[in-house]
Image: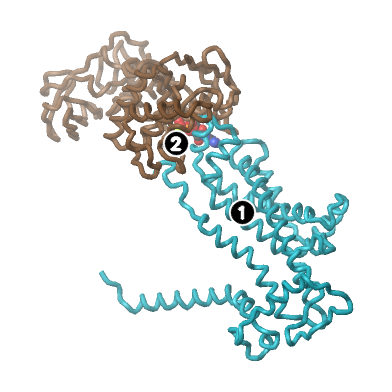
Amino acid sequence: MNRPLAPRVTRALLLTVFSALFVLYVAGPVAWLVSSSLQTEAQITEVPPNWLPPTPSIANFEAIFAASERVVTYENRRQGEALTSNFLPSGAANLLPAMRNSLVVGAWVAALNLLLSVTAAYAIAVIDFRGRRATLYVALATRVVPDIALVVPLFLVIRNLGLINSLGALVVTYLAITVPFTIFILISYFEGIPRDLYRAARIDGCGHGRALWHVYLPLSLPALVASLTFAFLTSWNEFVFALVLTQNVAAQTLPIIISGFIMDFTTSFSFVNAAGVIAIIPPVLMAVVFQRYIVSGLTAGAVKG
Amino acid sequence: MARITCAALTKKYGDVVAVDALDLEIAHGEFMVLLGPSGCGKTTTLNMIAGLEEISAGRLSFDDAEVTWTPPHRREVAMVFQSYALYPNKTVRENIASPLPLRRQPAAAIDSAVAAAAAQLEITHLLDRRPNELSGGQRQRVALGRAIVRNPAVFLMDGPLSNLDATLRLSMRGLIKRLHQDLKSTFVYVTHDQAEAMTLADRIAVMRGGLIQQLDTPEGIYERPANLFVAGFLGSPPINLIEGVMAGGAFSRGGWRLALPNPPADGRSVTLGLRPEDVMVAAPGLARLDARVELVSPLGSETHLDVVAEGGLKLTLRVPKEWRAAVGDQIGFGIDPARLHLFDRASELRL
Ligand SMILES: Nc1ncnc2c1ncn2[C@@H]1O[C@H](COP(=O)(O)OP(=O)(O)O)[C@@H](O)[C@H]1O
Ligand SMILES: [Mg+2]
């Protein structure tokens, strides 16, 4: 039986239009970022804007790498003109070290977050102990408090620990943000794994450590990858705590350095945009590498199918 | 080497008493079946024996060693689950071998043990598949393989055949019985299927509401049910229960009287149990009771008749397949008083 043609065409058309609008909404800013990073300052500021670079150039990126070889001082910091894209912000040389800091912090946060959350989530989801629910609620409740309210107390704690201006300060702080959410996500995933698999593992000779390693982790790959990505991105993007807890370039991360490029009187959009493009490369790479692991259906066939 | 002793074994979930002070001794090499309706505490009992559920009160011993607080991986028990519980990310070979590497056995020993188990269960050709490429019956064979490869002293099975279709269930039942004869381990088997219980068990523990109602051999349970619940739970079609009172040494219901061999005191309210097969059907007028046929259910091997006897008494009778009856026919049947079951109506206990 064929359905009438007209409703089907309308449906397809509507779907296409709305998908296109959605993609434009999500990807538009990123596309503009990439496009403008390949334009000169003059081209970027033209009206109407150049959606595509009229004369694509990697001059902005060259400036970033050149900046790391040039010492910017008070005397020479105003060299070049913003309009001809030869202007370099004073902190330009800090961009690549900041990127390294961001990567180091992100890697530690992603790894430690997984380690802490997996064990905590296993305990709460699988082991029957008094206060298991309360543990989760308390952990989640800490995330109800707005970050900005925590800035000052956290600053005092970190300072008293002697961690101000260290990457460790950021790692510890970001873990406090990511661990409760990750536990929450992993608990619901673990609870979806048939309880009989846990029982079988215990009978087969697994203690809790082995049950976690042999049963829960292999079956939770998508959730683990999602947690890894979530923690890394949270760390990569975080601004408020980084601003307060790090005060010199030794420990400052990308968002702090890049935001520093936006100055009171002159801002080189082309340079900032090129820096922005560099900043999104690691997360994009991560998404590309991990997306093939984010597949469900791994538990198919575990129990009665 | 395993005698299992449950002494006042109790499991509470908050206010719910799932298993209530259960006393049970399972002999070495015995095939014990826990039988009862859903929710009666069979699985909970089994899980406590396995160590998968914490014991709220009471004591559990294997032979003379108390294991009440021993974690499952130190109890030397194997278990087969209704849901099969195969590791989906592992092949059949790895699934069957999974208890072994953890027990630090050499690789060659593992290979030969897996091969032997697979051969015994006729699943050698499936060894490299994954669980999702197997049928239900094959999965349950793999689960059995994972259990027997350890050569355990205690074998626990929680409704292992409940998810299989009828024919498969029958052949797997035979397989499990042979397994028990070969292995000579202690088996504890949970089911709500009376036919499974009757065919497999050395002894059956009939459970209800966390309590054991009767513990006996299959014949004992069927022929001498301890109470109304056990009488009603076993038998297909179920036993006919007729309520009445004792009068003049005979069972009396309405105008109908039936003399009993060892009658209880007069005036007592009793329930008479009559198994559908314990009747002699004859032409009308020739036997004790006359009845009219209401429903005929031929099963091929035998026929079930739903009849209404004198006084509006509704009964189900089981007659040989040769007996051709039609709805509306008048028949007669006789009862052997020696095969009747008599229960006190208040206490529901056997008299
Ligand atoms: N985890 C649990 N929490 C609360 N009640 C439970 C739990 N497991 C079982 N029960 C209760 O205990 C009783 C016995 O359950 P179970 O042993 O699974 O019965 P069966 O296996 O005989 O069907 C049931 O009333 C059930 O609702
Ligand atoms: Mg059960």
Q: Residue most toward the front?
A: A69
User: Which quadrant does the N terminus of chain A fall into?
Assistant: bottom left
Quarter of the view holding residue B138: top left
Residue under the point 26% across and 12% down:
B338
Camera-side residue of A114 and B206: A114
The residue positioned farthest toward the top in the image shown: B262
Judging from the image, mark 1 belongs to the subunit labelled A
In the picture, the quarter occupied by the C terminus of chain A is top left
Is residue A188 in view?
A: yes
The amino acid sitting under disc 2 is Glu
Of A304 and A290, the residue lying toward us: A290
Q: In which quarter of the image is residue B130?
A: top left
Q: Position of residue B180 (x, y in %)?
A: 37, 20
Few, some or many C-alpha atoms within 10 Å of disc 1 (few <14, some 14-19, many ≥20)? many
The disc label shown at residue A227, or none: 1
The chain ID associated with circle 2 is B
Chain B colour as displayed: brown
* Closer to viewer: mark 2 or mark 1: 2
Task: Name which quarter of the figure residue B332 lies in.
Answer: top left
Q: In what element is the residue under mark 1?
A: helix
* B206 left or right of A212 in image: left
Image coordinates of residue A199 in percent, x first then y, are 51, 34
Q: Where is residue B161 in the image (x, y as percent from the top left)?
A: 36, 33
